[in-house]
Amino acid sequence: MSFREDFLWGGASAANQYEGGYLSGGKGLAVADALTGGDGIHGVPRTFIAKMPDGTMKKFGNMEEVPLGAEVIVDENTYYPSHVATDFYHHWKEDLALSAEMGFKCFRMSINWTRIFPNGDDETPNEEGLQFYEDVFKECKRLGMEPLVTIYHFDCPLHLANAYDGWVSKHTLEAFKRYAKLLFERYKGLVHYWLTINEININTNFMMNGVHDHISNRQNAEQARYNLFVGSAYAVKVGHEIDPENKIGLMIAHGVSYPYSCDPKDVFAELDDSRHGKWLYGDVQVRGKYPQWKINELKREGITLDKDPGDDELLKEGVVDFYSFSYYSSQAIAAKTDDKESSAGNQSHGVKNPHLQASEWGWTIDPLGLRITLNEIYDRYQIPLMIVENGLGALDKVEEDGSVHDPYRINYMRDHIQMMKDAVEIDGVDLMGYTPWGSIDLVSAGTGEMRKRYGFVYVNMDDDGNGDLSRSKKDSFFYMKKVYESNGEDL
Ligand code: P53
């Protein structure tokens, strides 16, 4: 058995990195709109500018350090990559046509919360924003592509971050519930595939999510995590009530972790890291409750979650239909890390794996790790899986004739799709679809760079905002088209 006949081949994007039009059509400010670009290769982080309670301005490398009471602002004289991004807002017809030409059956995108509720918690929604997405979804359908819609992808409204400490607060949770419910009502019949919270496992630590004091204040971090779980469960429940046809998934940042050695201490370190970093999130959203080790941990640390009546039932009722995840790389985990080189990538801990090569940004390239990941998840939960992000962030060179030769990306795609095929054909994993990341170039979430490109379509835009935003096909465009049109047979 090869890939299903109805396999959802496609590509993935997120509004905060792709859409631009940051104040167009009534949109309000999101945290991402206040984050400057960084320099990933040279390790320069993205920054926020905040107005301090005493009126002075200060720069911060992380929301963690911005004190509550300070106001993160958008400074007129600073360049922010999300403001134009790669301008899906004005190029959506062209981009969807290019995607359909590549053979997409599915297009993953997210809705910008602040395009619907400019402050996150407004009384009435912004009709112009709602209409924008309706037009986009209709065009997807017309082109034979199922929209796969992420409700929340790194775009906490700036107002909720500044005034309410983002997801730490129940106010944010309640605002999210209203927002999610409205989307299900409005797009009923038009959208059938949904993801609740992008990479929920990195959401409390990631700087775009509006939580200020999450590293030193464990109580706040755990409450924010809990509120995200409740918000996700509510979305699943209400989404099913509004339309039983809806298929609603969770979304977790994966990447397999290997014990650095067969020393049981390394093996335990890996177990502990993986259950904190990944399995907790799957367990809550697939099994509907916190695992016992986590309950014990909270108790031991004296952390009490602020729960509302009915929450336990809600977590049970809001279990997902499918399990989606991002996969870019793997990491090695050691009990003792001080004598080893640390690894880069989108996962927090880890040491350098001597067996693997890495990308220009230091993310290891590990196709077999994808087959391992698919098996680990499927063995554990036995529900359908979907890979909703995968790909190689690389420096591309435009030739004089405008072409982009990206054999490194083609090799990465081929090797990973082969592993998906093995997982499906040999291991019997139930895989629904594959939407590689940033199929049309967009801004990097981690570094804010443009030059860290994932796309099969090149967008003429650089790190300083120069470029006419024109689109052109890379060599990988033609490769992916061949793969998709052969339902993954012709690699
Ligand atoms: P970039 C951090 C940790 C885990 C996943 O990443 C991450 C990040 C951000 O780096 O991002 C996911 O753009 C995410 C996308 C993001 C993609 O991976 O830093 O869902 O928004 O763009 C790739 O290379």
Image: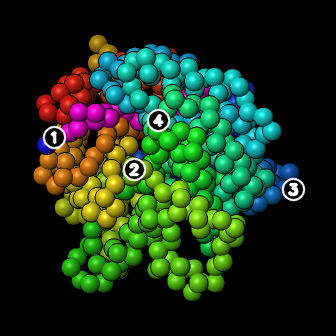
Choose the circle earlier in sequence order: 3 or 4.
3
Is residue 351 found left or right of 191 in the rendered image?
left
User: In the rendered structure, which amino acid carries the disc numbered 2?
Assistant: Phe
As measured in the structure, the alpha-carbon distance from the residue carrying label 4 to the one carrying label 1 is: 24 Å
Q: Nearer the viewer, mark 3 or mark 2?
A: 2
User: How was this image coloured?
Assistant: rainbow
Q: Amino acid at mark 4?
A: His
Which amino acid type corresponds to the residue marked 1 in the rendered image? Ser
Which residue position is annotated with label 4? 192
Q: Secondary structure at mark 4?
A: loop
**Tag 1 residue:** 2
5 in the magenta segment:
yes
Cα separation, mark 3 vs mark 4, equals 49 Å
SS type, badge 3: loop
Marker disc for residue 54: 3
Spatial CA distance of label 2 from label 4 is 13 Å
Say above or below: 38 vs 344.
Answer: above
Q: Which residue is mark 2?
A: 322
Please report the bounds of the magenta region as a residue range.
3-25
The answer to which of marks 4 and 1 sits earlier in the sequence is 1
